């Protein structure tokens, strides 16, 4: 595998990954131009709920990509179908469970967020419509994951871009032409998700996926089912650790005042953009690692490790350099408050170093998931969370918000360090080397 071949897969995946958070951002931007600020508050609350729920179940895409990449490497067409249908059925089941328990989910989440009365009204409208798209949204994760695992990267990119473009058009139509406000935003999103699901299903059928595999004994193989459940459980624990860190970070930032909270929010958004770039490399590394494991190709595996390390370093340096040069411009894209801009620039040094310390953890995550050896990912995240807690409780009382950012950087660095330490054990476990 050459650098060109690696980047040929990685670059479309970077573009594809960056589209992930756009649905909620588009919804928020469209209602942001309406007269009542409660509209944007309602959509913001609603998208926060769905982003959290779907993020928790993001393992459906990751694990589907990993198992499919291994089947692709093994040239086993039955496994191709099985690697799709298992998580596909799981996604639909989880989605329907969300619909059945929607009232309980709404009560719990709204009690936790405690939005003002008028914001609550609009958030309730948004939630009550969009929840019906849960089976389609989660199944779309699986479809995208399968296409990625089969290295049909351009097809997966088309599907995601189509979803976002359709959502933009429908948002504008329903909100600014039909004047449906928050309800129009929710309807636009759910139509986009449903259309993406049916187009994705059509693509699957034309890629030799036969739904008769539902009756194939391999689909219900006990050891394979346990493996899938184990991988998904590890990835969910990983996501829970990440949510704990981010929620603690936000809550503590709020104690330092509204301006500090806003400055941190701006910098966290910039951090997300950096992380999504590196996630694109992680996806490429996952594909090639899965292919190598499926084909028992040690040479491809070692080459993937080398290229993952090389491009993680190159991309992280480039991202950090670009941000340092355009720091003020980047911050001002998110806010025009002078006080917030000043504070964001004061704490911006932590974002300067974030891509350097976090890159290997983000990219090697793809290597471990591609090998479906996710216990290492789970353990590294738990250790990183412990490191975060230690720094959080020792440095925040002394250095305030700088101590908070130091804890976040320590967490990011821990993710890189612990996964790098696990690489040799991964190699021994997969290839017995």
Image (cartoon, grey):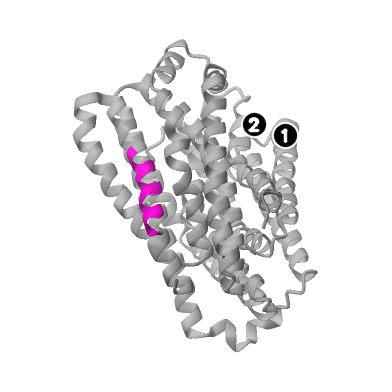
Upstream in sequence: badge 2 or badge 1: 2
Mark 2 neighbour density, 10 Å: few (under 14) some (14–19) many (20 or more)? many
Q: Is residue 126 visible?
A: no
- Give me the residue at 59% from left, 73% from top: 294
Please, which residue is most extreme toward the bottom here?
Answer: 217
CB under 8 Å between discs 2 and 1: yes
Please, which residue is most extreme toward the top here?
Answer: 338
Q: In this view, does 206 lie to the left or right of 265?
A: right
Q: Is mark 2 on a helix, strand or loop?
A: helix
Residue denoted by label 1 = 172
Residue denoted by label 2 = 30
Residue 230 picture location, percent across and down: 42, 71
- Give me the residue at 22% from left, 31% from top: 395
Q: Is mark 1 on a helix, strand or loop?
A: helix
- Give me the residue at 55% from left, 20% from top: 325
Please, which residue is most extreme toward the right here?
Answer: 206
Q: Tell me if residue 119 comes above or below residue 97 in the rendering.
A: above
Quadrant containing the N terminus is bottom right
Q: Which span of residues is magenta-colored?
A: 410-422
Let me know if residue 418 is in the magenta part: yes
Residue 330 picture location, percent across and down: 55, 22
Let me know if residue 324 is in the magenta part: no
Q: In this view, does 67 lie to the left or right of 159?
A: left
């Amino acid at each position: 595998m050459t650098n060109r071949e690696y980047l040929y897969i990685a670059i479309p995946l970077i573009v594809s990954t960056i589209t992930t958070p756009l649905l909620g951002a588009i919804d928020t931007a469209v209602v942001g131009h309406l007269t009542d600020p409660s509209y944007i508050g309602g959509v913001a609350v609603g998208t926060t709920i769905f982003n959290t729920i779907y993020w928790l179940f993001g393992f459906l895409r990751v694990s589907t990509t990993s198992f499919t990449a291994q089947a692709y490497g093994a040239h086993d067409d039955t496994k191709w179908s099985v690697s799709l249908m298992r998580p596909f059925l799981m996604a639909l089941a989880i989605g329907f469970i969300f619909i059945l328990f929607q009232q309980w989910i709404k009560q719990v989440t709204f009690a936790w967020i405690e939005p003002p009365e008028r914001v609550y009204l609009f958030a309730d409208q948004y939630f009550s419509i969009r929840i019906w798209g849960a089976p389609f949204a989660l199944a779309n994760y699986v479809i995208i994951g399968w296409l990625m695992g089969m290295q049909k990267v351009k097809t997966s990119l088309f599907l995601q871009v189509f979803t976002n473009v359709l959502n933009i058009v429908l948002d504008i139509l329903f909100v600014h032409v039909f004047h449906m406000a928050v309800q129009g935003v929710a309807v636009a999103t759910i139509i986009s998700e449903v259309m993406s699901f049916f187009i994705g299903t059509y693509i699957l059928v034309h890629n030799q996926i036969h739904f008769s595999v539902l009756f194939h004994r391999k689909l219900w193989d006990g050891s394979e089912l346990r493996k899938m459940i184990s991988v998904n459980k590890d990835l969910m624990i990983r996501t829970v650790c990440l949510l704990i860190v981010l929620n603690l970070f936000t809550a503590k930032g709020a104690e330092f005042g509204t301006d500090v909270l806003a400055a941190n929010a701006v910098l966290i958004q910039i951090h997300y953009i950096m992380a999504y770039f590196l996630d694109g490399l992680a996806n490429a590394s996952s594909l090639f690692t899965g292919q190598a494991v499926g084909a028992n190709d040690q040479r491809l595996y070692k080459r993937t490790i080398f290229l993952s390390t090389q491009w993680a370093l190159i991309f992280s340096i480039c991202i950090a350099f670009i941000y340092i040069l355009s720091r003020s411009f980047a911050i001002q894209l998110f806010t025009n408050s002078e006080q917030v801009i000043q504070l964001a620039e004061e704490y911006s040094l932590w974002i300067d170093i974030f891509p350097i310390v976090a890159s290997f953890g983000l990219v090697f995550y793809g290597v471990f998931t591609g090998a479906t050896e996710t216990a290492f990912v789970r353990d590294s995240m738990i250790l990183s969370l412990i490191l975060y807690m230690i720094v959080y409780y020792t440095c925040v009382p002394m250095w305030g918000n700088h101590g908070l950012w130091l804890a976040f950087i320590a967490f990011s660095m821990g993710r890189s360090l612990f996964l790098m330490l696990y690489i040799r054990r991964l190699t021994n476990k997969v290839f017995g080397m």
